[in-house]
Every structure is written in C-alpha cells, then in structure tokens.
Amino acid sequence: MERTWWKEAVVYQIYPRSFNDSNGDGIGDLNGITEKMDYLKKLGIDVIWLSPVYESPNDDNGYDISNYRGIMKDFGTMEDFDRMLAAAHERGIRIVMDLVVNHTSDEHPWFVESRKSKDNPYRDYYIWREGKNGKEPNNWGSCFSGPAWEYDGQTDMYYLHLFSRKQPDLNWDNPKVRDEVFDMMDWWCQKGIDGFRMDVISLISKVPELPDGKVGKNGYGDYGPYVCNGPHVHEYLQEMNRRVLSRYDLLTVGECSGVTVEEAKKYASLDGKELNMVFQFEHMDLDGGETFKWNERKIKLTELKQVLTKWQTSLMGKAWNSLYWCNHDQPRMLSRLGNDSPQYREVSAKMLATCLHMMQGTPYVYQGEELGMTNVPFQTLEDFRDIESINAYHELVGQGVIDGDTMMRYLRYKSRDNARTPMQWNDGENAGFTEGTPWIMVNPNYIEINAEEELAREDSVFYYYQKLIRLRHENPVIVYGDYKLLLPEHEALYAYTRELDGEKLLVICNFSSEEQKMDLPEEFSGKEGTVLISNYEDSRPEEHMTLRAYEAAVYRF
Ligand code: TEU
Ligand code: CA
C-alpha cells in the first residue's frame, strides 16, 4: 500500500464556538484557537479539522452558510483566520476546513435570488417543486423534524431542505452550482488550507423523481434511499477531484450518512479518484431504533465488533478508513460505551482510546475527548441549544409518541449538545473558557476534569492520548498492518491483532467493570511479548490472563 501523510496523521476536531473565547463575549473564536496552538502541538496531533467558521445566521451553528468566503463575526475576521493558519503551519499542524455544500443558508445571496421568481438565473441552484393537492411534493421528513419542504408564497412552490428550513438543498445537477462550489474550494486551497471535511457529501445527488419514503413513527417518510449515495454522486466527486482536489496536497474526508462498505470502496478508493476517506455511521447507529436516535439503549459489544471488523477487513487494501468515537453530532462516547463514574472514568476513557487508535485508518480526536470529558447533566429544555434536540422534543412529545420526562432523559443521553459544552481548560470560572457568559452551560464537573489538572499529572487521559499518537507516528504496523478480530462472540472483551512484515500487535480491551479471563492466543504462545501501552501499570502478556475493569493493553511480538 502506498504510504502517505494523511494515512499516518491523527486529526483533532475543533468546534470553534466551544473551544476557547478570547474576547469575553461567551463564544469561542479564532484567536482563542491560536492561543491554544501549543496545547495541540503538545498533544502531538497533525491536523485540525475546523467545524464551519464561515458567515452564518447560526440556525445550525455554522452548518448554514451565507457566505463561503467570509468569516463569521462571532469568530473574528479573515485576518484572524490567516494568523491562526500561520500559527498552525509554523508548528507543522495542517488545517482542514469543513465544507458544507449539500445546502446553504436561506440567507445566502444565491437563495435570496432563487426564491424571487421562477425565471431568476439562480432559480435552479436549488430544488423547487410544485405542491401535490395543496400539500408538500412528497412525504419526506426533515432530519430536524417537520416536513423536508418549505412552501414559498412568492412563487407558490416548495423548496427541499433535508435539514432545517433555513438550510435549502443545492441542486448539484446544475453545472453552474458545481462551478461555483469548485471555484470557492479552489479559492481556499490558494489560501493555503490543507483539506476538506465534506458535510453530508453522500446526499448531494437525489433520485430525480423524489419518491415518497417509508413512513416512520413521526409520520414522515424516510428520504434515505433516494438521497444517500444517489445516482450521480460519484460522477460529481470525480469531477471535483479532477478540477480541484488533485491539484493540491490535501486530506479529504466525506461525511457519508447511509454509506455501505461497497459504496465506501468507491468514495475512498486507494486509486485516489474521489476522496481519501469517509466517515461511516454504522457503529454510531447501532443503538438507534423506532424513535430514531432517541432512546437509552446500550450498544452491544458483539455487534460493535462485527461492524468495525467489517469496515476494517473490507476496506483493507482497497480503500482507507477513518476512525472516530466522538464528534460534534454525538454524545460523549465515554458516557455511552465507557463508564463516566469517578471510579472508572479515566481507565475506561483510556480503554476506548486504545481500542480505536490501534485500528487501521486515520483517527479523529474530538475536543475534550483527550481529557475524558463526559455527557452533561442538562436539567431542562432551556439548557439545550441544538436545533435537532429542541425540535425533536417538540415533535415527538407534541405528537404523544414519547412523554416529556422520558424525552428529557433521552436528550440528556443522546443530544448533540453533550459534545458542545465549553472545553474545560481549568478549574476557574467557566472552566477557563470565557470571562463572559458562555453561550451554553459549562459541565459542572470541570472542577475535577480539566486540561490544567491533566497536564500536571503524568498518568492523565491527556498523556495517554499523547502516547497513542506518538506510537502511531513511530510504528508503521499501527498505520498499515493487517487487522484480525479474535473472540468475536465474547461479550466483554474486544481483542484483535495487527500485523506488518512479521511484526505483530495483540490488542486487548475489557469493555466491562468485571474481571475477564483470556488465554494468550496460540499464535503468540511461547513467544516473548513486550508492552507497547496499557492503562494499568502492570499489564503483562501471559498464557492465562485476567483483565481487570476496563483494562486495555497492547503487546508487541
Ligand atoms: O451532519 C449530518 C448528519 O448526518 C447529522 O444529521 C447527524 O445524523 C445528526 O446530527 C445526528 O444527530 C452534518 C453535520 O455534522 C451536522 O452538525 C449538521 O447539523 C448537518 O450535517 C447539517 O449540515
Ligand atoms: Ca469570542
């Protein structure tokens, strides 16, 4: 397999609104990121993925863009951006921009024009349809509740919005839209940025008939089958690759809801015709159900292993994986798959990190994950800021599908806001995030869980992540080795091997608080193994092993 920098890199995701506020207005900003560049250098990451910093009315915290070439006032100026980029580059850190081009804001000048009249030159930049019998053109529901169509009285037609009504979908079948997007991408590349994370890029090509979808618990049809991996998506990405991506040295990752391994082999093929890698959702959707993500179900370890192993082995030698537990759309994995009680928080955070970072693919660390940050004790609906959470509460409780108290518990467990509370820098006021009033509450556990405390303590989660990142940089077997699952039926242990040029790693992770027995697999029997990393001081590779609560160890043979 060809060796490239983006296969060997570790990416750190910053959600700028919640990272660090430099001017006391309660909102994180670009200068705040620049201030913390040495912290990121110390962690050892190679790349920052910056969630959107473009001009936006913030209906969905910047994922609704009104100007792709301007910086959101809350976050600073283009000069601040350039300074941040230079500060990163000086330290050998690359910057990957979020590219949100499945939709724009309804306040983007293209849409302002588009809605004016049926013959406006920008009309076909978006997806307009006539109503059916005085109702929406089809039964699709929006990802953020309500119908996926908004009626516009000006021209007596509806526009499609898979997300909020302030996020109209672009019409990628229009070559002018593709020209505009590619020009804009080129402009950022000329500026010197190092790649793109492409928001819901798997949704850009819709089946032209837009047929009704299967009706779910909320009464709306599922658009998934007609928009995920649609008819022209690969053609459009290949065009993007020819016209922009291939002309620069970039890291590209497509956020691909609805992606299967077969589709991923096209998006992220090692021949480089489209993208470097995709974010898949299968492991994140394992605890989904009738009421979508809203429940308190626990992911079964056997199912998790089956899904992640399928991705590891099917893409091996054909396409490249991305590896993630956390991002700004997911609750904290530590509270979901690990154990956030004071007794086990650190050890289980390290276990989860070991399990993920020893796999093949490019790992992504989400801000605060390296500190073992947890879900948040939100009290009332007023504590939430996320449009998805607030709308889902009103829709599902309003329709009587879920009662109010139950839905509050579901929000507390699954809301995206769990990942969006301020980064916990120290035990001072507002966790050192801001001198003003933070735009969303701070997790009260910042007194115990914060960067300053962890930086001063050798056995902290922070230094464990630092070590995992360094090990990846130093050991090609972690990046390129073959993956093989052991004990697929075991309900508490996740064990696997990696192998490259005769060098072997044995990775063992105990996902439970109980002791678990495991015999050294035969292939290692009688061989001398050394400890590469572990979250207990005295982990050893022995013929008969007893794994303690959340113990994780990597042995090299
Ligand atoms: O997320 C796309 C996506 O698939 C989400 O709808 C995801 O399923 C949901 O957030 C899980 O609860 C991207 C961005 O990452 C997200 O922040 C945006 O809200 C969304 O696109 C619209 O741009
Ligand atoms: Ca600020």
Image (cartoon, rainbow, N blue to C red):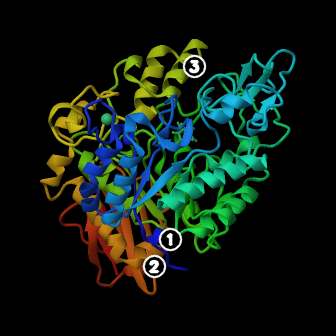
Q: Which residue is mark 3?
A: 396
Residue 521 appears in the picture as rendered: no
Mark 2–mark 1 CB contact (< 8 Å): yes
Q: Where is the N terminus found, in terms of image quarters? A: bottom right
Across and down, in percent, residue 236 comes to 73, 56
Q: Which residue is mark 2?
A: 499
CA gap, disc 1 and disc 3: 42 Å
Q: Quadrant of ligand 1?
A: top right
**Mark 2: C-beta under 8 Å from nearest atom of ligand 1:** no
How many numbered marks are there? 3
Q: Which residue is mark 1?
A: 484
- Dot 2 amino acid type: Glu
Across and down, in percent, residue 78 comes to 42, 46
Disc 3 on helix, strand or loop? helix
Between marks 1 and 3 in the image, the one whose residue lies nearer the viewer: 3
Mark 2 vs 3, N-terminal side:
3
Mark 1 vs 3, N-terminal side:
3
- Dot 3 amino acid type: Leu
Q: Residue furthest bottom?
A: 502
Across and down, in percent, residue 26 comes to 30, 30
Q: Name the disc covering residue 48, or none.
A: none
Disc 2 on helix, strand or loop? strand
Quarter of the image for residue 5 reads bottom left
Between marks 2 and 1 in the image, the one whose residue lies nearer the viewer: 2
Please say if 206 is above or below 439. below
Left or right, 272 with respect to 305, comes to: right
Residue, x 63% and y 49% (percent of image)?
Answer: 201
CA gap, disc 2 and disc 3: 48 Å
Left or right, 146 with respect to 500, comes to: right
From the viewer's side, name the closer residue of 303 and 20.
20
